[in-house]
Image: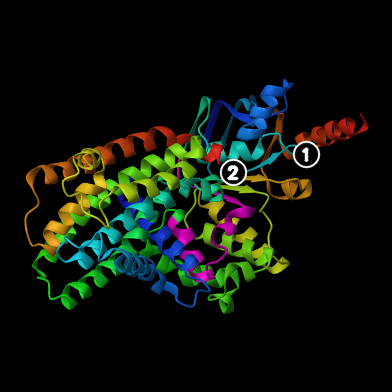
């Protein structure tokens, strides 16, 4: 029987966001004085349901603000769903581009230990994997350099190297699927394939459709918090492109 | 809550924060004891012949008050912004949120230990009995519990009410003046009554009894310490546990 690693069942998520409202002078003065802004509730995810099996790579596409990152955060448990439920099996790691800003003033070595600890490794097991993480990142000569002196590409390499060494069974990647130079990309692809072949599941968020077509077994298309399409890459991507083009024409 | 993971992560975050805050500083960790020491020197110069006239071993009396209050103030003020300061972290990883507050308390505990070493040196210098220092760690353990609970509460509440951070920073200055740190309560009944509701009064008075005067604190003082510590921890954990689920969305 094929194991389902992620089951998202009728999940909804709301946020209170700042908005502009017609106000009388007194209300406006109070608002200026207190700095408080009026809030309204928006539903970022609406009744989203799908599942991801072990050993599957799923692409997640949609316009900016369609709820992709919120969905990944809800799956990883960073956000609690306001409706429905998420069930997962295995260790979840969420990687996004700002992960390295946590340790801007730390050396690469200290950052690796901190990040491993955040990803659930004990200091002892982080120590055991340290050399392997550094080797994989190809940044061995910068171990004692502070992170703010690194280029964006170098930082992404470190984040990726740490994540794949922390035994993830569910890897959620927000716009960070292909990082670094071509050599590193090839190595990352191989590593992800290795994890997937061992039963891990991957969800990739990207605006790069050719990348999605190349690596994903299936695609989910999120539009205004709802699933607008799901299934085989070619078909869903085609409808997505058509919808986007017609929106632009309008 | 996974206590082992929370502890490990709290320690890792404290270590990272410690390295961050000492970066590019010439005096580095020397700043930790230097700050209370400068305050001590100033207050001693101003008050030793006035308010400290009738207080036996006034320099030690003053130093204990300063370092214990410093631990309380630094930790709670630091904690009040600890969740908001770590917005990116909260949005990136699911981890026990309690470890963020724990890291602030551990970092302060580390600098408090530096200050205790200085206190020890002063005890030797003034030829005071050292026997009381053996019991100080027990008192420190209760202070740690009290401060941890209080920090949990204030860090969680300030995510929902941003004003708390400023209010608390101001309130600690008032509490500093209200606590008998550089003066003695003497016979002032009203001041004593107010201090009954000030947990730091209990901790500081008990520490002076034990460390300087090598005497057992009064029973009601010990009862106050135990009560304030566990009530603080209970309320802090309960409030934090209730509010923590929405931290990532609100910061």
The residue wearing badge 2 is A56
Query: Along the line of sight, which residue is nearer the eye, A140 or A199?
Result: A140
Where is residue A7 shown, x and y percent of the image? 52, 32
Dot 1, how many residues are within 10 Å of its Cα: few (below 14), some (14-19), or many (20+)? few
In the depicted structure, whether residue B125 falls above or below residue B162:
below
Report the chain holding disc 1: A
* First-in-chain label (1 vs 2): 2
Q: Position of residue A54 (x, y in %)?
A: 53, 42
Q: Is residue B25 visible?
A: yes
Label 1 sits on residue: A234
Q: What percent of the width, then of the height, locates residue B128? A: 12, 72
Give the camera-side residue of A212 and A74: A74
Can you say whether A70 is above or below B201 in the image?
above
User: Is A92 in the magenta?
Assistant: yes
Tell me the SS state at disc 2: loop
The chain that hosts pointer 2 is A
**Front-lying residue, A188 or B176:** B176
Q: How is the image coloured?
A: rainbow
Give the quadrant of the C terminus of chain A: top right
Instruction: Please tell me whether residue B201 is drawn above or below residue B135 in the rendered image.
Output: above
From which residue to which does the magenta span run? A89-117
Q: Going 51% across and 48% down the picture, which residue do you hit?
A: B93
Q: Residue at x 75, y 45 (%)?
A: A207
Q: Can the viewer see residue A200 in this picture?
A: no
């Amino acid at each position: 029987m094929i194991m389902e690693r992620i089951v998202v069942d009728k999940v909804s998520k709301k946020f209170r966001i700042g908005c502009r409202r017609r106000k009388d002078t007194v209300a406006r003065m109070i608002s200026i004085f207190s700095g408080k802004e009026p809030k309204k509730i928006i539903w970022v995810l609406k009744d989203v349901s799908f599942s991801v099996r072990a050993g599957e790579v799923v692409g997640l596409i949609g316009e900016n603000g369609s709820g992709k990152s919120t969905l990944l955060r809800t799956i990883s448990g960073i956000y609690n769903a306001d409706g429905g439920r998420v069930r997962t099996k295995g260790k979840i790691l969420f990687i996004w581009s700002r992960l390295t800003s946590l340790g801007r003033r730390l050396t690469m070595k200290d950052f690796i230990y901190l990040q491993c600890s955040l990803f659930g490794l004990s200091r002892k097991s982080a120590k055991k994997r340290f050399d392997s993480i550094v080797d994989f990142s190809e940044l061995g000569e910068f171990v004692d350099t502070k992170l703010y002196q690194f280029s964006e590409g170098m930082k992404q390499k470190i984040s990726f190297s740490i994540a794949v060494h922390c035994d993830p069974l569910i890897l959620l990647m927000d716009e960070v699927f292909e990082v670094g130079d071509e050599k590193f990309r090839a190595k990352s692809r191989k590593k992800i394939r290795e994890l997937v072949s061992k039963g891990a599941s991957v969800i990739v968020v990207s605006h790069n459709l050719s990348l999605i077509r190349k690596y994903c077994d299936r695609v989910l298309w999120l539009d205004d918090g709802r699933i607008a399409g799901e299934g085989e890459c070619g078909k869903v991507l085609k409808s997505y492109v058509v919808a986007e083009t017609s929106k632009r024409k309008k | 809550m996974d206590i082992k993971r929370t502890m490990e992560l709290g320690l890792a975050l404290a270590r990272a924060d410690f390295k961050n805050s000492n970066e590019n500083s010439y005096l580095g960790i020397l700043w930790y004891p230097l700050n209370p020491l400068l305050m001590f020197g100033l207050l001693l110069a101003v008050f030793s012949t006035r308010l400290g006239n009738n207080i036996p071993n006034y320099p030690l009396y003053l130093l204990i008050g300063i370092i214990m209050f410093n631990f309380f103030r630094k930790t709670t003020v630091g904690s009040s912004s600890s969740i908001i300061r770590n917005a990116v972290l909260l949005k990136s990883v699911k981890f026990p949120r309690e470890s963020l507050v724990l890291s602030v308390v551990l970092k302060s505990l580390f600098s408090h230990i530096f200050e205790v070493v200085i206190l020890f040196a002063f005890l030797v210098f003034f030829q005071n009995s050292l026997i009381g220092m053996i019991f100080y760690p027990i008192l420190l353990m209760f202070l740690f519990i009290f401060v941890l609970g209080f920090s949990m509460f204030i860090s969680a509440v300030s995510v929902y009410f941003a004003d708390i951070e400023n209010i608390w920073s101001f309130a600690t200055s008032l509490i500093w003046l209200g606590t008998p740190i550089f003066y003695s309560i003497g016979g002032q009944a009203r001041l004593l009554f107010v201090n009954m509701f000030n947990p730091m009064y209990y901790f500081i008075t008990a520490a002076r009894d034990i460390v300087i005067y090598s005497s057992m604190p009064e029973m009601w003082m010990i009862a106050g310490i135990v009560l304030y510590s566990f009530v603080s921890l209970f309320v802090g954990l309960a409030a934090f546990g209730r509010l923590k689920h929405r931290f990532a969305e609100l910061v």
